[in-house]
Amino acid sequence: MPIDVAITRLPHGKDLPLPAYQSAQAAGLDLTAAVAAPVTLAPGDRAMIPTGLAIALPPGTEAQVRPRSGLAAKQGVTLLNSPGTIDADYRGEIQVILVNLGREPVIIERGMRIAQMVIAPVMQARWQEVAELPATARGDGGFGSTGVK
């Protein structure tokens, strides 16, 4: 079910397309690079890539910025803080922290689709401190405690 989200193109992103879904059932909107000149990411390098966009999300929502699967699988480029969270009260530019985990340099060019953004509902917690938590079958079993198969 679509929701209305206010969006502003910043001066350095005026000529770039708005984020868009690439298929009818897509969950994520593609974000593009609003770089003035190509940025070369050597293996192991990271860079903050601007999108030229700012948004005003409705209360009770967030935007999650996630890697693009093709860029990750084919070139080893992903996001360092994945998913990155854009809070409903943030009004600054959306920027994407890309990292090259591949073996070859990758060039980020203006207009390149670099990440995807998913708009999602948010619940805020209200802590209720208790002396003891309710029991479960798993208990306090941590990493790997439920087995492999």
Image: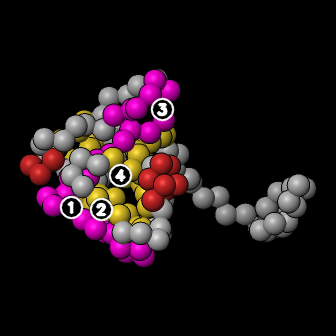
| Cβ–Cβ under 8 Å for marks 2 and 1 | yes
Q: Quadrant of residue 16?
A: top left
- Separation (CA) of disc 1 from disc 4: 13 Å
User: Given the image, on which type of amino acid does mark 2 rest?
Assistant: Ile
Query: Which residue sits at x=15%, y=47%?
Result: 13
Label 4 crowd bin: few (<14), some (14–19), many (20+), radius 10 Å: many
Question: SS for tag 3?
Answer: loop
In the image, residue 66 lies at what x, y percent?
45, 52
Question: SS for tag 2?
Answer: strand
Q: Main secondary structure of the magenta part?
A: loop
Q: Which residue is mark 1?
A: 38
| Cβ–Cβ under 8 Å for marks 2 and 3 | no
In the image, residue 149 lies at what x, y percent?
88, 55
Q: Nearer the viewer, residue 65 or 100?
A: 100
Q: Which residue is mark 4?
A: 114
Question: SS for tag 1?
Answer: loop
Label 3 crowd bin: few (<14), some (14–19), many (20+), radius 10 Å: few
Of the image marks 4 and 2, the number of the one nearer the N terminus: 2
Of the image marks 2 and 3, the number of the one nearer the N terminus: 3
Of the image marks 4 and 3, the number of the one nearer the N terminus: 3
On screen, residue 114 versus residue 137, left or right, reads left
- Separation (CA) of disc 2 from disc 1: 6 Å
User: Given the image, on which type of amino acid does mark 4 rest?
Assistant: Ile
Magenta residues span 20-47
Residue furthest to the front = 104
The mark found on residue 107 in the picture is 2
